């Protein structure tokens, strides 16, 4: 078994998961699109849970408004490339991990670059409606397991966060907009996939705001739940092999 699996940092994980599941986690190839308030915490949870091969995709730099909810965003990292700052954080957890940072936008022009077919898991934490719809469509054409985050802004109640199949999501404006887009364009995902969402919808307290307010205890839970979907799926696969 690889040394990074046997590392003392995974002792408590191995006690619960078992050595076979921990080893299997270390072999999975995961790509995560968007490392903001949701994606950054998902990445942290994946690495702490034993994922060894992780590609993180985001084109942005850390800005002051990120600090309240994004894992790698601090007053010291403002101005840094998000994926590079997050990579350093993840390597400080597991120096043996293979973290590939891609400072790129996922869109029609760049989609072929990401070689989605080469991954075991694809995770969507993209904000852009158009790009998110494209990722959903293309990811569902691969053999990879695919999980997606719906909107995590304008929410404060963690007990309302749920996981369900995309077409069963209720009360989420982003999911509604995506479904309307698929119906309008008559292009639908080729298979079902699980989403993290909340039907809570609050309003900004500040009028004419250019963005929607969000809090770390919500965005982090979204990210952790996406990570949990990966971990649970790997564990089920190992149990099935037995």
Image (cartoon, grey):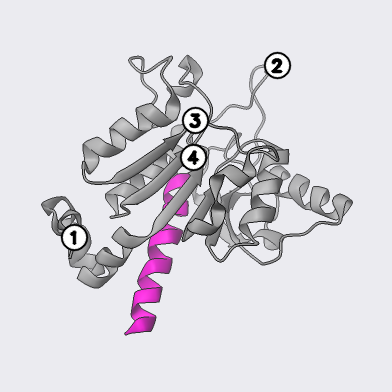
In the rendered image, residue 29, in percent from the top left (x then y), is placed at: 41, 56
Residue where numbered disc 4 is placed: 38
On whether residue 21 falls in the magenta region, the answer is no
Q: Residues within 10 Å of mark 2 (few under 14, many from 20)?
A: few
- Specify the segment rendered in magenta: 222-242
In whole angstroms, how far apart are the C-alphas of marks 3 and 1?
29 Å
Q: Which one is in front, 158 or 55? A: 55
Q: Is residue 56 left or right of residue 196?
A: left
In the rendered image, residue 61, in percent from the top left (x then y), is placed at: 48, 21
Q: Residue at x 20, y 69 (%)?
A: 19
Q: Is residue 147 left or right of residue 74?
A: right
In whole angstroms, how far apart are the C-alphas of marks 3 and 2?
33 Å
In the rendered image, residue 183, in percent from the top left (x then y), is placed at: 85, 55
Residue 230, quarter of the rendered image: bottom left
Residue at the far left in the pictured view: 8
In the rendered image, residue 176, in percent from the top left (x then y), is placed at: 76, 49
Observer-side mark, 3 or 4, equals 3
Q: Earlier in the sequence, mark 3 or mark 1?
A: 1
- Chief secondary structure of the magenta portion: helix
Image quadrant holding the C terminus, namely: bottom left
Residue where numbered disc 1 is placed: 2
Marker disc for residue 103: 3
Q: Residue at x 29, y 33 (%)?
A: 89
């Amino acid at each position: 078994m690889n040394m990074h699996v046997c590392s003392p940092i995974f002792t408590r994980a191995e006690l619960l998961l078992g050595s076979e599941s921990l080893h299997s986690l270390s072999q999975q190839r995961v790509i995560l699109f968007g490392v903001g308030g949701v994606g950054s915490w998902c990445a942290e949870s994946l690495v702490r849970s034993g994922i060894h091969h992780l590609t993180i995709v985001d084109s942005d730099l850390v800005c002051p408004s990120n600090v309240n909810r994004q894992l790698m965003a601090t007053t010291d990292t403002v101005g840094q490339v998000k994926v590079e700052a997050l990579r350093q954080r993840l390597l400080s957890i597991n120096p043996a991990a293979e973290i590939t940072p891609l400072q790129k936008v996922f869109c029609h022009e760049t989609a072929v670059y990401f070689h989605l077919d080469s991954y075991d898991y694809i995770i969507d934490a993209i904000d852009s409606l158009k790009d998110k719809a494209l990722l959903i469509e293309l990811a569902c054409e691969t053999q990879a397991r695919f999980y997606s985050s719906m909107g995590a802004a304008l929410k404060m109640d963690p007990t309302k966060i749920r996981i369900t199949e995309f077409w069963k999501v209720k009360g989420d404006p982003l999911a509604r907009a995506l479904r309307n887009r698929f119906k309008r364009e008559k292009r639908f995902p080729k298979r079902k996939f699980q989403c993290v969402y909340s039907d809570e919808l609050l309003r900004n307290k500040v009028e004419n705001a250019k963005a929607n307010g969000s809090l770390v205890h919500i965005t982090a839970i979204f990210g952790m739940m996406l990570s949990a979907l990966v971990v649970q799926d790997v564990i089920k696969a190992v149990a099935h092999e037995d």
